[in-house]
Amino acid sequence: MKAKSRLPKDRALAVKALTAAIDDRVDDLHQVMFLLRCFGDGIAFTYQSKYALKHLMFDEKYEAKQQPGFMTGKKGFAREYRVLCSGIRAGVPVLLADITNIIRHGDVCAMGGPDPVPIEVKSSRTKRARPQRQVSQLQALADFYENDGADNFRGAPNVRRTELLVEEANFEGVMNNCIRQAMLNGTAMAEPETGLWYIAVQVEGLEQGRETTVLDESLLPFLGKGRLVVHPTPDSTWWHMLPFTLTLDTGNTLAFIQREVLIFVVIDVMHAKELFRQAGVHAVALFDGTWAFQISRDAEDFSAGVFRIAEQHFLRVTHDFLSLRWFVEENAAFLSASLEKFFPHAESGTEGEVAGRFMFDEAQMAEWRSVRDVWDREDEATPLEEDGRGRPEPTR
């Protein structure tokens, strides 16, 4: 484009401002859609296990599938609605996938069985690549649910599902009470168990111009080496966690959605390591953007079992308001049971074979043996803080 065809500066600025305003409006609409779908998630999680539902959020590469768009004017919606009504008339609990954040496979999902059953509704048979890929993904999911695992699932070898070994414990009531106290008194803090704190701050009570200072003052006593500070927010960073529409009571849900109250969850990661030690498990706090912990029975000999806990999974402690002690006990119990259950023929001392099946190859084994706690790496002695994208990282 020639320079003489450019818009005058004042008009260019006006167009730029209009474009920015439109982008902001689109973002606002997406946020409203996310919040409305949280109530649809509440229905899904009422009927199905959160651990089963999470698989409906990811594609074959274990990346989050694109969120659904607008339902207005959607081609094929009438057919989806007819399938929905047919299921309801038959007494089967069913959901439109588009009214949830979690169900991103299929158009309609049957919820009455032991696992969710996503259904793709098509107007006619087609051999186009995209529909065929969708059918293939649905079949892989169905096989995974049916067999409680797969030799290769979304690129990961030897994936197995297992029931919880320790009864889940949570502190939903403590968090709800903490929010209520903050709405009355401005701020509130609760320590449901050692190494775990809940902090709630009423936004209206923050003095204008001192918001950041007041928040810093509220969090300062909890900062330090090995401390993880997570700020759950009512947006898409909630990922596949249990929806806050189920864990928070009605008044608190409304205050949280309208951001009248801010909540923070602080975890003493060093205490989590101590809990693992008490359970006879060697734990390394990684927090590298993917993995939270690497746990094994022995720091060097992996023949008795070793695996890594994803940060997304660990953040259930902060978003599902789970007990930290329970989380440690459950994963320690799984480590003890996994070798016997999934590798029953492995014998003590056969690390090469076990490691090969557990961790792919010896080169990776060497890397896993060399890992250190996050606070012992480059950003030594810095507290950890949630970066807003669903994972913790060192505070600068």
Image (cartoon, grey):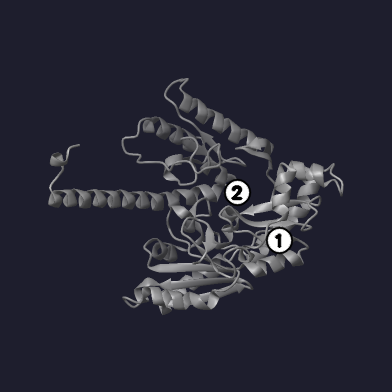
Q: Which mark is residue 51?
A: 2
Q: Residues within 10 Å of mark 1 (few under 14, many from 20)?
A: many
What element does badge 1 sit on?
strand
Residue at the spot 37% in from the left edge and 52% down from the top edge: 31
Judge by depth and name the residue closer to the eye, 290 or 116. Answer: 290
Kindly identify which residue carries mark 1.
283
Judge by depth and name the residue closer to the eye, 229 or 8. Answer: 8
Q: Which mark is residue 217?
A: none
**Can see residue 166?**
no
Residue at the spot 43% in from the left edge and 21% down from the top edge: 124
In this view, 336 is above or below 343: below
The quarter of the image holding the N terminus is top left
In this view, 272 is above or below 301: below
| Badge 2 amino acid | Tyr
Q: CA distance from mark 2 to mark 1?
A: 23 Å
What element does badge 2 sit on?
helix
In this view, 362 is above or below 235: above
